[in-house]
Structures are given as C-alpha cells and as structure tokens.
Image (cartoon, helix red, strand yellow):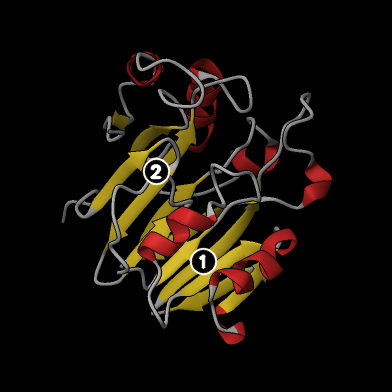
C-alpha cells in the first residue's frame, strides 16, 4: 500500500487527504468550490490556517471541523452546526469516521509568532494503521520530538516556524518513513526550501515534494 496515495499538499500548509473520507488540514488558497470535506482540521487561528473563505469552499452540510478553542465561535459563524464544531487543545484524543486523532502542542521556542500559551496544535491522524503527523506552525520542540509517526508534514520556510535545517533535525529525531515539507514557497520561504530540506535528510527517510 502506498501510504502517500490520496495525499496532496495544495498550497502553503494546506493538505488534502483522501483515504475513503476526505480530510482537509488548514485549507488555504482553494481554487474552486469542492464542498467535499468530511472532516476539516485547523491548527490555529492565523489567516493562512483558519481561512473562512477557503473553509467555505470545501465544507458541506455535515462536515465536522476541529479548531483551536480561540476560533470555535468563528467556525459557527461560517455555517457549521454546533454539534459539528469541536474545540481542541494540546494532548487530546478524538475519533471520527474510524480515524484516531491526537493533538500535539505547536509553538515557537524563541519567537513570538506562536506562543505556547495559545494552546495551538498539530495533529496526528491514524488511518489504516498509518500515522500521519501534521506539525502545524511549530519549532523543533520536545513535544514534536516525541511524536511517533510514519509520515511527517513539517514546516520548512523559516521566519514563523522551523527552517529546513531545523525541520530536518526534527525529522532525524522522530524518524518517519516519509518527511513532507510544507509552509514554504508562498507566504514565506523560497521554492527551493523543499529541495534543501530533502537534501538535508538522512537517506533512511524518504521525501516527496508535494507542494504545488
């Protein structure tokens, strides 16, 4: 089984997973109305991760959405019914559609863009016994370094998150089968950052450049 089958990095940190159910993480710069999401996960409240306009392009009537607690009310204003909006914080576990979901702290250690006390998150999704880690906007933290996963989506663009060197260091610590670079080439970072990240990885870790 190809563990990357059905997975796209659309733009920036926007990820679409089709593994029987359609999952979007941080939908952003969506090119048209798809309205096919069974589940949407947002890592935090910044406009490039919680984008109301883009969420509207992928949501449908019964879509479930997981958001950090600071945007629960904003999610309801978009048109989600109350029981389909789940506020999350770090160290929680959920199960939807047979998919196990864990929330991992996502924060900066020395920068002020993503304070730890905001309780923003990354996610680990377990689908068909494969663990996918979407790190969110984070540095190489002790919590991220303890994640166990098969596929890691890591921000590499620097400035607001890890750069490609720090992201490669995190990948070395958690040793996924695949490491996928995100969060570069659009708002922040250069288009070359994905290649630089790939070239910085141990040969034991496979890397696919999925960002469009």
* Disc 2 element: loop
- Residue at image position (52%, 70%) is 65
* Disc 1 element: strand
- The answer to whether residue 91 of the structure is visible from this angle is no
- Residue 29 tag number: 2
- Residue 101 tag number: 1
Farthest residue to the left: give it: 1
In the drawing, does residue 87 fall left or right of residue 38? right
- Residue at image position (48%, 27%) is 172
Residue 54 versus residue 113 in the image, above or below: below
Mark 1 is surrounded, within 10 Å at the Cα level, by few (under 14), some (14 to 19) or many (20 or more) other residues, namely: some
Q: Position of residue 115 (x, y in %)?
A: 79, 39
Q: Nearer the viewer, mark 1 or mark 2?
A: 2
For the C terminus, which image quadrant? Answer: top left
Q: CA distance from mark 1 to mark 2?
A: 25 Å
Mark 2 is surrounded, within 10 Å at the Cα level, by few (under 14), some (14 to 19) or many (20 or more) other residues, namely: some
In the drawing, does residue 75 fall left or right of residue 17? right
- The answer to whether residue 141 of the structure is visible from this angle is yes
Q: Position of residue 176 (x, y in %)?
A: 40, 40
């Amino acid at each position: 089984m190809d563990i990357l089958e059905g997975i796209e990095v659309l733009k920036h940190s926007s990820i679409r997973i089709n593994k029987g159910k359609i999952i979007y993480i941080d939908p952003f710069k969506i090119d048209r109305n798809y309205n096919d999401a069974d589940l949407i996960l947002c890592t935090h409240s910044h406009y490039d991760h919680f984008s109301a306009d883009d969420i509207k392009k992928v949501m449908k009537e019964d879509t479930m959405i997981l958001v950090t607690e600071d945007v629960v009310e904003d999610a309801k204003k978009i048109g989600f019914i109350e029981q389909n909006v789940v506020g999350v914080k770090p160290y929680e576990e959920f199960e939807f559609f047979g998919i196990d979901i864990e929330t991992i702290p996502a924060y900066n250690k020395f920068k002020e863009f993503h304070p730890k006390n905001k309780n923003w998150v990354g996610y680990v999704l377990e689908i068909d016994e494969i663990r996918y880690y979407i790190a969110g906007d984070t540095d190489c933290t002790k919590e991220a370094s303890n994640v166990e996963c098969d596929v890691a989506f890591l921000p590499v663009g620097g400035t607001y998150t890890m750069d490609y060197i720090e992201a490669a260091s995190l990948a070395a610590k958690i040793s996924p089968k695949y490491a996928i670079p995100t969060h570069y080439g659009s708002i922040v970072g250069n288009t070359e950052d994905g290649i630089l990240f790939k070239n910085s990885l141990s040969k034991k870790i496979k890397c696919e450049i999925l960002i469009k």
